[in-house]
Image (cartoon, rainbow, N blue to C red):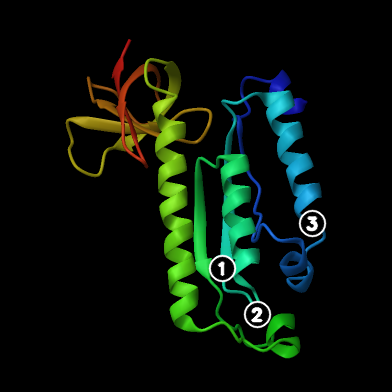
Amino acid sequence: YMMKKHDNICKYIHLPAQSGNSRILELMNRTYDRQLYISKIDAIRRILGEDCGISSDMITGFCSEMEEEHQETLTLMDYVKYDFSYMFYYSERPGTLAEKKYEDDVSLEVKKRRLTEIIDKQQALSLVRNKRDIGKTYEVLVEGYSKRSKEQMQGRNTANKVIIFPANGLNKGNYVNVKVYECTTATLFGKIV
């Protein structure tokens, strides 16, 4: 409710899921299951609306993860429609609870295939979410020049999405209204209005 009440708080939440399967979440020693996580997402969408940016962390191939449990991660991603995610396949970390308690028994080949499926799913979701922004105008904090050209600046909107727009003599730290006219899976492109 505090985020909704104040315009100076970004409408963006990083809410790591790690997995879409409750058994795997328990093995990971998480304090939530799939249904509790979904209830948090539902509350975010109800209070802050569909335009609130949501990102996640996903780990595939955790110890003993079965194919149907991996599929539950994909269906969770479809449900939430993340704007972006940080995605990895599981690898043992020395000294962790998982390394001490569980056998890393999912093959590297399976881990990589599952990770590719998660990445492909996220790219498709990111594109859908970004296409929703075409035609909308956002107040953007100028962060500096874009990576490709000093004739363009980049900044972020309230949902933490990168927007590229003409430099027009702007400086880092300025605020500017930008109307989005195009997008990729990772970036919005706009014009100053």
Residue at 44% from the left image edge and 56% from the top image edge: 119
Q: Which residue is mark 2?
A: 63
Label 3: element kind: loop
User: Where the N terminus falls, by quadrant?
Assistant: top right
Q: Find residue 71 and report its image quarter.
A: bottom right
Is residue 96 at all visible to an observer of this figure? Answer: no
Q: Earlier in the sequence, mark 3 or mark 2?
A: 3
User: Where the C terminus falls, by quadrant?
Assistant: top left
- Left or right relative to 164: residue 56: right
* Above or below, 100 relative to 47: below
CB contact under 8 Å: marks 3 and 1: no
CB contact under 8 Å: marks 1 and 2: no
Q: Which residue is mark 3?
A: 33
Q: Earlier in the sequence, mark 3 or mark 1?
A: 3
Where does the image place residue 134, in percent across and percent down from the top left? 37, 21
Label 2: element kind: loop
Label 1: element kind: strand
Which amino acid, mark 2? Cys
Which amino acid, mark 3? Asp
Q: Which residue is mark 1?
A: 60
- Left or right relative to 166: residue 173: right
Which amino acid, mark 1? Thr
